[in-house]
């Protein structure tokens, strides 16, 4: 009986070793495999222009650079992507990615992310929230990108280069970019910026910032009409006139003088008007009295005495 139990124990132990060995071999093979649609070369997987419509499978788990540019991807598989725990470089430009990026980037330590030339229309606070190591982010040439939420990059404190050029952005909150402590390069060109009062703080920041703006000559206003084509860095005087909130001391003095002149002029005009009314009333009243006296009817003739009284 004891020998049978010993044999069973050895058999179970041998089975566990076999399972462990098979698992290790499978993981090793997965780490060495390469998608058939792509080419692999030492931690780099290149799937450029392969007409891919879905995220490629069998990507080596130790991949550090993944290039998926010029394909037909409509979404990124979060499950497959986040298995690449060493991935630091991801190029998904020139695809048809939409707004399905929420909760996509969870466990990947990306430093470089290119999402340019896609169909993204909105960036929310949760889109890149977990990409705390991100240094370069390219969102240019997304023709439907109309909105970036105020705190969309609040957790990307290491971001140094951000490209928002050639999108449909008309407005962006100044704190979205001004509170990025590491930001050094920013692309804002060829966007239909509405240079109205809500953009006042942002335009002032653009004027005073020491950030390097790429393609600065094409950072212009689309509206209002009177400053169409005006550089974002030259709109401060116009925006101050339109919004009339940022006045200098001399402006307040001028306004006080104008107010005093208007008040004084109004008082004088009112006084003169009153004097004229009184004089007119008196003159008209005297004339009417004289006319009344001239037109007073003569006294009635006396009645003749009765004949009896004469008799």
Image: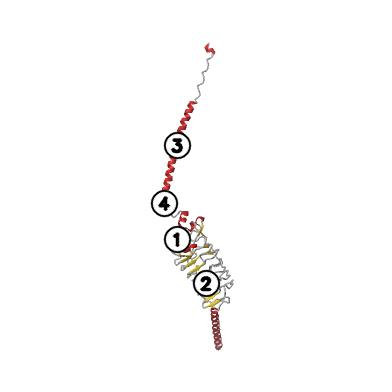
* Element type at mark 2: strand
CA distance separating discs 2 and 1:
33 Å
Q: What is the crowding at mark 4: few (fewer than 14 residues within 10 Å), some, or many (at least 20)?
A: few
Q: Are marks 2 and 1 in contact (CB under 8 Å)?
A: no
Which is more N-terminal, label 1 or label 2? 2
Q: Nearer the viewer, mark 2 or mark 1?
A: 1
Q: Are marks 1 and 3 in contact (CB under 8 Å)?
A: no
253 or 106: which is nearer to us?
Answer: 253
Q: Are marks 4 and 2 in contact (CB under 8 Å)?
A: no
Which residue does the numbered mark 2 point to in the structure image? Answer: 90
Q: Are marks 4 and 1 in contact (CB under 8 Å)?
A: no
Which is more N-terminal, label 3 or label 1? 1
Residue 284: image x %, image y %? 47, 32
**Does 16 sit above or below residue 125?**
below
Q: Nearer the viewer, mark 1 or mark 3?
A: 1
Residue 207's tag is 1
Q: Residue at x 42, y 41 (%)?
A: 268
* Element type at mark 4: helix
Q: What is the crowding at mark 1: few (fewer than 14 residues within 10 Å), some, or many (at least 20)?
A: some
Q: What is the crowding at mark 3: few (fewer than 14 residues within 10 Å), some, or many (at least 20)?
A: few
Which residue does the numbered mark 3 point to in the structure image? Answer: 276
Q: Which quadrant holds the N terminus?
A: bottom right
Residue 252's tag is 4
Which is more N-terminal, label 4 or label 3? 4
**Does 194 sit above or below residue 100?**
above
């Amino acid at each position: 009986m004891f020998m049978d139990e010993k044999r069973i124990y050895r058999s179970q132990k041998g089975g566990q070793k076999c399972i462990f060995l098979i698992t290790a071999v499978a993981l090793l093979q997965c780490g060495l495999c390469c998608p058939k649609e792509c080419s692999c070369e030492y931690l780099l997987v290149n799937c450029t222009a392969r007409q891919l419509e879905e995220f490629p499978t069998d990507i080596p788990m130790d991949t550090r650079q993944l290039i998926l540019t010029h394909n037909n991807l409509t979404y990124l598989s979060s499950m497959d992507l986040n298995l690449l725990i060493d991935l630091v470089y991801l190029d998904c430009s020139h695809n048809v990615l939409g707004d399905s990026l929420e909760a996509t980037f969870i466990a990947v330590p990306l430093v470089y992310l290119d999402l340019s030339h896609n169909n993204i229309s909105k960036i929310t606070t949760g889109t890149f929230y977990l990409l705390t190591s991100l240094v370069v982010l390219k969102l240019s040439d997304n023709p439907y990108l109309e909105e970036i939420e105020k705190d969309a990059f609040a957790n990307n404190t290491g971001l140094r280069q951000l490209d928002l050029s050639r999108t449909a952005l008309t407005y962006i909150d100044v704190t979205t970019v001004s509170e990025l402590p590491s930001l050094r390069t920013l692309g804002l060109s060829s966007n239909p910026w509405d240079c109205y009062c809500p953009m006042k703080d942002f335009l002032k920041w653009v004027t005073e910032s020491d950030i390097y703006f790429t393609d600065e000559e094409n950072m212009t206003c689309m509206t209002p009409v009177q400053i169409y084509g005006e550089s974002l860095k030259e709109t401060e005087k116009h925006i101050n006139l339109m919004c009339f909130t940022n006045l200098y001391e001399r402006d307040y003095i001028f306004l006080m003088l104008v107010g005093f002149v208007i008040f004084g002029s109004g008082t004088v005009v009112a006084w003169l008007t009153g004097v004229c009314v009184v004089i007119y009333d008196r003159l008209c009243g005297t004339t009417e009295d004289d006319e009344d006296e001239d037109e007073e009817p003569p006294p009635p003739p006396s009645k003749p005495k009765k004949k009896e009284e004469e008799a």
